[in-house]
Image (cartoon, coloured by chain):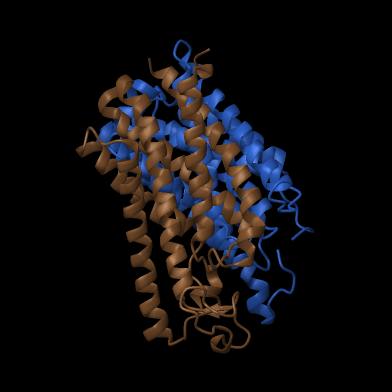
Amino acid sequence: MSDLKEIPPNTLAMFGISGGLLGIYLSPLFPTAGALGAICAVIWSAEAVRRVAKYGLGTGVPSIGQIAMGMGIIAAMFGLAIVKSMPLAGPILALVTASIIGFIIGWFAQNVIKMKIPVMIRCMTEIAAGGALIIIGFSAAVAGNFDFMGSIIPKVFDNGVMLAVFWVGAMAMLHPFNACLGPDERQKRLLYLAGSTGAITMAIMGIAATMTLGASGAATLILGIILWLIFYKKFWDEVYNDAASVIGTGLIPKTEA
Amino acid sequence: MVLLDPTTIIDILLIGLSGTLICLAVHFIPVGGAPAAMAQATGIGTGTVELAAGSGLVGLITSSYMYAYEPSADVYLVMAAGAMGAAIMLASTMLAGGLIYAYGVAVPFASAQVKKDPITGERQDIYVSKGTQGQGIPTICFVSGVVGAALGGAGGGLIYFVLMGYYTPLITTHAAAVAGVFTMGVFYVNSVIPSYGVGGTIEGVHDPKFKRVVPKDVFTSAIVSMLCGIIAIMIAGGMT
């Protein structure tokens, strides 16, 4: 609720962007870092989904996760493919491209389709950028680095792991708010659930990475499972904490989140 | 600048057109959302994106199969294969859903938006239960859904065909995966935009909402898809 202190959107955006990019840039040395970066982006974009979906999209929360991944994958492919001579610029270019696509779609949703959601443009920009970072991060964890032509196409696109990155990544982003929405929805609980969905996505990417990279993939798998257990326990505790007032009084909270 | 080449411009317009086809397709599909899942609204009981993407991706599989096994296939054949695959997928979804609505939930199929079914001419309003927005999948919704899925599948096939033309000379064996994933991205963007326009539920071509929302959704999709087309062609520039 509003009387509880929430982490401001800008702080989370800083966390998502810096954590995501740092993880992606460290992935050539240590592929697991790509997945850890993607978890930062998952936490950020799940909170952005929360802010926009609170207004009621009329189509269900999953739609916004899917459009985020649709925009993210287009921008990620563009950003990574276009930089031939300076591959280090790839992830940043993908992030910028995703933000531009997200801004344009958000602008059209607000002004042409007339959705009347005040945070639409900002949140659409954020989730598109988050989607691009999630896709690059998890792809880098499977491919071992973020070289589009050399690693990502043969190790992520050709064997179809991309579909798992796309779908499980979308689930990681949209599930937290889809599961937590309703009365007494709180940011802290959602953030822990986002961490847990991100971590279980990391574990799934670990299985794929074991196939493509071998031993370093197994590190992603094991770390993913450990992180999932930690975050899920935290989420579990939050659920019990929040449910205490309902169990104690038997009254359902009146306010809609 | 390679983007100003006439063939490139035509290809960008074709990708814009296919995105527009996908967007238009969503409006034809009878999407009922959560109310329909409880048989309280006409249509299939799931979201717009799930239906459009589910049928469209099957269309993408059938069109890519056509492209892969018939090297001389022209664009119409690839689009027709996509349309067939998507239409069969959605028709079977609606058939299975209809069986459940009729024999499981036991509701009469009726549309709340029209008084008489435009195809069969049967009265609708007397069969609509009080407090609901119609139930099940009446004939007009079924036909509209099949037409919509065919449009979506054709649109998916068209993007795939255009992209394969760019990527195959550059990355040969990897082209199908890259073009397929890009098509999927464009598909999701273009199936969510109209679902925001229709606000979650639409019965099909006979729904009054159809005329109201199609122009602005199609305009948005055309612009966004052409942007995607420019990006797709620039990706090809990065592969050389």
Side of A97 where B154 appears, left or right: left
**Residue drawn 42% across the image and 25% down it:** A146
Q: Position of residue B95 (x, y in %)?
A: 35, 72
Q: Can residue A173 be seen in this view?
A: no
Q: Can residue B101 be seen in this view?
A: yes
Q: Nearer the viewer, residue A119 or A179?
A: A119
> In which quadrant of the rendered view does residue B166 lie?
top left
The colour applied to the residues of chain B in this rendering is brown
Q: Where is residue A89 in the image (x, y as percent from the top left)?
A: 52, 18
Q: Where is residue A92 in the image (x, y as percent from the top left)?
A: 56, 24
**Residue drawn 48% across the image and 66% down it:** B46
Relative to B187, does residue A16 appear above or below in the rendering? above
**Residue drawn 54% across the image and 54% down it:** A63
Quadrant holding the C terminus of chain A:
bottom right
Quadrant holding the N terminus of chain A:
bottom right
Q: Nearer the viewer, residue A158 or B54?
A: B54
**Residue drawn 64% across the image and 63% down it:** B209
Instruction: State the blue chain.
Output: A
Side of A134 where B211 appears, left or right: right
Q: Which of B177 and A53 is in front in this view?
A: B177
Q: Where is residue A225 in the image (x, y as percent from the top left)?
A: 39, 48
> In which quadrant of the rendered view does residue A251 lie?
bottom right
Relative to B124, does residue A136 appear above or below in the rendering? above
Relative to B118, does residue A146 appear above or below in the rendering? above
